[in-house]
Image: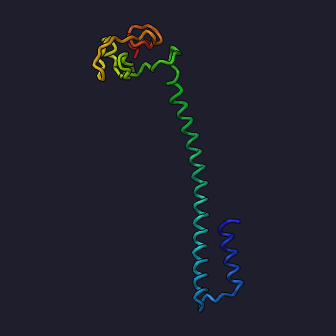
């Protein structure tokens, strides 16, 4: 039984008791309270209908977003060499300082220089990219030819 149905039942009970809503203070109070309950019931039903409609729209938007994500991100997830290295369009690379373990983000210029000074521990170290996906001309270890960009 919905709230509106319960309020209608309550209204019927009040009318069946022949409560004088014109002269009796209690009758007036009950009449006003039933009126308020009717408005609340209608408001709740409207909110529930809106909630269902919004849920359906959110599901549709979520499906559309999922399709967009597949188009946008699935192409970027696969790289040419299949090793999982960073995309060749990235201009920045992460390396770990062998002295303090700090993760450093460097660009291609620093990468080509071959050495870096850690801003945390101030130690200089050579960049060793031999554990990356392969040797190449650019020295970043990604296995791609950056001159084709």
In the foreground, 126 or 88 = 126
Question: Where's the C terminus, which quadrant?
Answer: top left
Identified at 57% across, 66% down, the residue is 43
Residue 128 percent across, percent down from the top left: 39, 10
In the foreground, 94 or 2 = 94
Q: Quadrant of residue 112?
A: top left
Identified at 58% across, 40% down, the residue is 63
Residue 19 percent across, percent down from the top left: 66, 87
Residue 64 percent across, percent down from the top left: 56, 39
Identified at 30% across, 11% down, the residue is 113
The answer to whether 5 appears left or right of 79 in the picture is: right
The answer to whether 83 appears left or right of 117 in the picture is: right
Identified at 58% across, 71% down, the residue is 39
Depicted 149 relative to depicted 64: above or below? above
Depicted 125 relative to depicted 2: above or below? above
Depicted 103 relative to depicted 22: above or below? above
Q: Quadrant of residue 30?
A: bottom right
Residue 125 percent across, percent down from the top left: 32, 12
Depicted 89 relative to depicted 135: above or below? below
Question: Where's the N terminus, which quadrant?
Answer: bottom right
């Amino acid at each position: 039984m919905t709230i509106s149905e319960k309020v209608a039942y309550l209204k019927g009970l009040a009318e069946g008791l022949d409560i004088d809503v014109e002269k009796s203070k209690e009758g007036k109070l009950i009449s006003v309270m039933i009126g308020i309950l009717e408005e609340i019931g209608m408001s709740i039903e409207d909110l529930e209908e809106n909630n269902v409609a919004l849920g359906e729209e959110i599901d549709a938007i979520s499906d559309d977003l999922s399709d967009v994500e597949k188009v946008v991100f699935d192409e970027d997830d696969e790289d040419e060499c299949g090793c999982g290295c960073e995309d060749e369009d990235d201009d920045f690379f992460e390396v770990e300082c062998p002295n303090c373990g700090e993760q450093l983000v460097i660009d291609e210029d620093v990468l080509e220089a071959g050495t870096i000074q850690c801003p945390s521990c101030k130690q200089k170290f050579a960049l060793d990219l031999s554990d990356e996906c392969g040797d190449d001309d650019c020295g970043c270890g990604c296995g791609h030819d950056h001159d084709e960009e």
